[in-house]
Image (tube, helix red, strand yellow):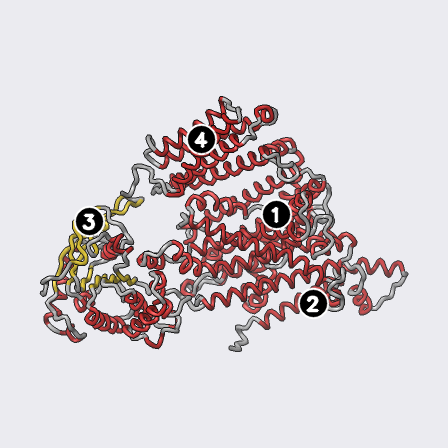
């Protein structure tokens, strides 16, 4: 009764697969009616219908096999459908008839059903949980990308509005040197240097004012307020002061990252409780001993929180600051000029770089956090509800 | 409740005074080269220290304007100008504020709806939520100019494109906060609803939604601040002539530092006001919910 | 005792519950046989880990058994829950901080669709029953722990269930408040003649309150002994000094010791 031997379809899953089967049948009908019955499209439709039938009726013993079956079916159907979408073959077989689109919807629904199946797997094994935690978002992400591809190419969405992922990928591949130069200018110089100085300064000032409760009471509310202000606005000033090249962007990043670090470090240094501090007192520990052995470790989760917030802020600051003037290189510069030339695919390529850089930056910090603060309750029960 | 030792008022005032004093000193230091150039051109050599300092504080395009210059400019462009005037900062602030508020409202509604869907659908929770969290690490603000230009290209103009950016920025914190809030009720509270065999809707309206309100307001504070930033950045791409962002850009084109600083000051006041309003609203709700009392 | 023509409220037959965990199966309950009759006050007592709370949660359908059967009012626990057959009192008062005491009591009534006039009447009655008449407009955090727990009892009673399930309701309170509430609970039980299943780990509390004391032992959680009390139904706190009371308490203590014969780390 606990470990289900056969898939228990919840209501939504039942609706999904029935809808998928129906729309596949409709799609096939459409192809026949429109006289477009093509061997491969037939296979695509048949695969979906078959997987729905199998999933619902016969072989399936578990959510795993059900999910895998649906994934494979949708994958196969998608490959066939995408191929028919390719330019050249697109016009002559005219797949844009309603039969074709019903097949697309069917593939999409069956993919959704697959995600539902995987998402409702209950397991006690940590490894399997990890695997699922990666698999499900990946399936969902690729499903989103494919949907994007289908919509933009199938409906002939104008390039300017939204280029297809394949177009962006192509542009990305063709513009590696430019993208790399921009990345070097914006990320490796402005972001990293500004981030290091800003976070370092925030941390040092927090330590400096640690012994003065008066200064803390004065600086904390101001720091909190400043964290909510539109600090990117100082970009034009910094460009005036430090010139067009990366130092002005680094300066913006410094200003943006300083206050979150200051506020969080001060809060973190206050995180140890009275009993722990009394314990250090009974050892007659010096101020610095207490700081290094008790208060800084207790402050680490707060400091990492600031480091993570700042990683995003730093990237935003550097890119936006470039809108106010740069030498002819840099991610923000590229975005604003290519937008002006309506080269939207290049803009998206640059955004992809920013996205990857941003999430890697954040990911590295999150890993370091795990390494250093594994003892903290928020890390110990990391499996979310 | 007047406890001088623990009060924040005095330290804050002193720190603010210290900052302003530092600002004045820096204004002298940073404006000195230009002032020396001026004197050289006028071939003046013996300038008294007091006059020199006063001169550095009253240049027309200083590297760093002195606080009173900024204050005067803010005063002149807000109180003394008609609100309809293109040179009134209130006029520009209103434009920025309206698009950021529209975006903020849309973003909050979208965020709440999405969080409800995520909390009530396992598959969405496991598939969409990781992407929402991951997308917070992406500098979404970088897309702002593109959205403006692209929407302009298909004929959407005016308030809406800017509001879209504010919406886009503000819905993330709301989703994340609301998911946390809607899942915040403790097990015994949920068990209680189960012993009443309450329906899903009843559990939602009577337990999950009320419990999530404090989280909602915390994330709305973040969202309102970032939606203002979004609106300002959205005004940067060429073409925008009104709004605080446009003022910043125009100031940087023409080297009008005082104009930049005063736009910045007004933007900051606006942000502080918005955050304070949401914060007070949140405090009031928390109080009504009895959550400040443990 | 007077077992004549009373009906069985809860009957448990060979019930077991096994939790699957990362470290293998945990037998929370095993071989549970129990019969609770109309009007009984049954205490479940035992050391931590003996499954007494789990058993109560199975009765309330907050947990599902993995073997055996259980009937509550002649139907399955799930059906009984949907019929709203019982009131449940948690260890924590579990009052909503954003509702006043009166509105907290109204909560289950709103959910069950009771009309507002009846609601008002029931709130008044039950507040009076737990001596909180003047506190309806207060918020939970304005009340002491003992008063909060009384309010949560009033909330459980407001739905007028014949069966009251209580999970260590006074466990977090100090001795003096607990004595007072025990006395009130007993008089309330005498007044309303409800069936109560009461989880506790206090021997005096169990003996003082109960008609039947179910002694449980851990690993696997099972019933060691069911002791039928021969104390009169009407009792005051003074009864705790009588030899009969002490004899019963000793029997419970011996039962607990026997069920817990091997030393083990908790």
| Total numbered labels | 4
Q: Separation of disc 1 and disc 4 at Cα?
A: 49 Å
A113 vs A337, nearest the viewer: A113
Asked whether, in this view, residue B228 is left or right of residue C101, the answer is: right
Name the element at disc 2: helix
Of discs 1 and 3, which sits in the foreground? 3
* Residue ID at (33%, 30%): A59
Q: Which residue is mark 1?
A: A315
- Report the chain holding disc 4: A
- Name which quarter of the figure residue A120 lies in: top left
Do the numbered discs 1 and 4 sit on residues whose CB atoms are within 8 Å?
no
**Does residue A315 lie above or below B203 as drawn?**
above
Give whichever of discs 1 and 4 has the lower sequence position: 4
Q: Which residue is mark 4?
A: A25
Name the element at disc 3: strand
Mark 3 and mark 2 on one chain = no
Name the element at disc 1: helix
- Report the chain holding disc 3: C
Mark 4 and mark 2 on one chain = no
Q: Separation of disc 1 and disc 3 at Cα?
A: 61 Å
Of discs 4 and 3, which sits in the foreground? 4
Pinpoint residue A305: horizontal percent, then vertical percent.
51, 53
Q: Separation of disc 2 and disc 1 at Cα?
A: 32 Å
Q: Separation of disc 3 and disc 2 at Cα?
A: 80 Å
* Residue ID at (36%, 68%): C116
Of discs 4 and 2, which sits in the foreground? 4
The label shown at residue B21 is 2
Of discs 2 and 1, which sits in the foreground? 1
The label shown at residue C69 is 3
């Amino acid at each position: 009764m606990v470990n289900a031997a056969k898939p228990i379809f919840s209501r939504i899953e039942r609706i999904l697969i029935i809808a998928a089967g129906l729309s596949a049948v409709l799609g096939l009908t459409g192809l026949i009616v429109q006289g477009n019955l093509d061997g491969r499209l037939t296979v695509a439709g048949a695969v979906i219908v078959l997987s729905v039938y199998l999933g619902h009726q016969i072989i399936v013993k578990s959510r795993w096999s059900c999910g895998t079956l649906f994934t494979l079916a949708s994958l196969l159907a998608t490959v066939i459908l995408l191929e028919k979408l390719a330019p050249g073959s697109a016009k002559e077989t005219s797949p844009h008839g309603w039969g074709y689109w019903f097949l697309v919807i069917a593939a999409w629904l069956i993919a959704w059903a697959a995600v539902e199946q995987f998402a409702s797997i209950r397991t006690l094994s940590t490894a399997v949980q990890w695997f699922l935690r990666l698999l499900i978002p990946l399936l969902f992400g690729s499903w989103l990308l494919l949907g994007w591809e289908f919509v933009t190419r199938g409906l002939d969405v104008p390039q300017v509005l939204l280029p297809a992922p394949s177009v962006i990928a192509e542009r990305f591949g063709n513009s590696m040197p430019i993208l790399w130069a921009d990345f070097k200018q914006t990320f490796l110089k402005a972001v990293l240097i500004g981030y290091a100085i800003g976070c370092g300064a925030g941390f040092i000032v927090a330590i400096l004012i640690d012994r003065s409760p008066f200064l803390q009471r004065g600086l904390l509310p101001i720091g909190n307020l400043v964290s909510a202000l539109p600090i990117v606005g100082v970009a034009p000033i910094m460009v005036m002061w430090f010139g067009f090249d990366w130092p002005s962007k680094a300066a913006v990043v410094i200003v943006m990252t300083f206050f979150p670090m200051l506020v969080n470090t001060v809060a973190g240094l206050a995180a140890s409780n009275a009993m722990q501090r009394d314990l250090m007192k009974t050892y007659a520990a010096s101020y610095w001993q207490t700081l290094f052995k008790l208060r800084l470790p207790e402050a680490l989760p707060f400091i990492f929180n600031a480091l993570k917030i700042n990683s995003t802020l730093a990237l935003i600051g550097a890119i936006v600051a470039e809108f106010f003037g740069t030498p002819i290189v840099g991610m923000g510069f590229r975005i604003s000029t290519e937008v002006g030339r309506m080269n939207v695919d290049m803009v998206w390529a640059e955004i992809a770089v920013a996205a990857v850089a941003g999430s890697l930056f954040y990911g590295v910090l999150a890993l370091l956090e795990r390494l250093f603060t594994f003892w903290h309750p928020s890390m110990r029960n990391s499996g979310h509800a | 409740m007047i406890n001088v030792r623990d009060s924040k008022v005095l330290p804050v005032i002193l720190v603010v005074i210290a900052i302003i004093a530092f600002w004045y000193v820096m204004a002298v230091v940073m404006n000195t080269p230009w002032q020396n150039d001026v004197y050289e051109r006028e071939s003046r050599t013996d300038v008294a220290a007091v006059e020199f300092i006063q001169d550095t504080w009253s240049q027309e395009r200083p590297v760093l304007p002195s606080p009173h210059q900024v204050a005067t400019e803010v005063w002149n462009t807000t109180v003394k100008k008609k609100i309809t005037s293109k040179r009134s900062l209130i006029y520009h602030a209103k434009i920025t504020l309206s698009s950021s508020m529209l975006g903020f409202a849309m973003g909050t509604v979208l965020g709440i709806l999405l969080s409800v869907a995520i909390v009530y659908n396992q598959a969405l929770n496991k598939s969409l939520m990781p992407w929402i969290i991951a997308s917070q690490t992406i500098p979404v603000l970088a897309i702002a100019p593109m959205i403006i230009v692209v929407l302009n290209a298909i004929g959407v103009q005016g308030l809406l494109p800017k509001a879209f950016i504010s919406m886009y920025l503000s819905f993330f914190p709301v989703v994340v906060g609301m998911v946390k809030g809607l899942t915040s009720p403790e097990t015994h509270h949920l068990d209680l609803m189960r012993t009443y065999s309450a329906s899903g809707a009843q559990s939602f309206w009577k337990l999950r939604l009320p419990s999530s309100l404090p989280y909602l307001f915390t994330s709305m504070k973040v969202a309102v601040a970032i939606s203002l930033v979004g609106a300002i950045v959205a005004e940067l791409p060429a073409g925008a002539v009104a709004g605080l962002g446009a003022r910043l850009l125009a100031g940087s084109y023409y080297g009008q530092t005082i104009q930049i600083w005063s736009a910045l000051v007004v933007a900051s006041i606006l942000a502080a006001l918005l955050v304070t309003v949401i914060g007070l609203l949140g405090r009031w709700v928390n109080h009504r919910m009895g959550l400040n009392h443990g | 005792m007077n077992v004549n023509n009373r009906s069985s409220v809860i009957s448990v037959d060979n019930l077991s519950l096994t939790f699957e965990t990362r470290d293998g199966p945990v037998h929370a309950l095993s071989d549970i046989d129990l019969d609770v009759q109309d009007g009984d006050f049954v205490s479940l007592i035992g050391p931590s880990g003996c499954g007494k709370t789990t058993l109560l949660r199975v009765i309330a359908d907050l947990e599902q058994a993995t073997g055996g059967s259980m009937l509550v009012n002649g139907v399955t626990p799930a059906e009984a829950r949907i019929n709203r057959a019982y009131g449940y009192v948690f260890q924590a008062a579990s009052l909503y901080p954003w509702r006043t005491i009166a509105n907290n009591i109204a909560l289950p009534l709103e959910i069950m669709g009771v009309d507002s006039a009846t609601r008002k009447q029931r709130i008044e009655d039950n507040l009076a029953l737990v001596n909180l008449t003047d506190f309806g407009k207060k918020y939970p955090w304005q009340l002491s722990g003992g008063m909060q727990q009384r309010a949560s009892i009033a909330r459980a009673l407001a739905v007028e269930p014949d069966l009251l399930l209580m999970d260590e309701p006074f466990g977090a309170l100090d001795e003096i408040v607990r004595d007072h509430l025990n006395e009130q609970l007993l008089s309330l039980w005498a007044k309303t003649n409800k069936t109560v299943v009461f989880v506790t780990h206090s021997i005096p509390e169990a003996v003082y309150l109960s008609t039947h004391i179910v002694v449980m032992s851990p690993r696997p959680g099972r019933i060691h002994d069911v002791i039928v009390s021969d104390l009169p139904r009407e009792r005051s706190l003074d009864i705790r000094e009588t030899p009969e009371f002490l004899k019963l308490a000793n029997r419970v203590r011996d039962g607990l010791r026997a069920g817990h014969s091997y030393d083990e780390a908790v």
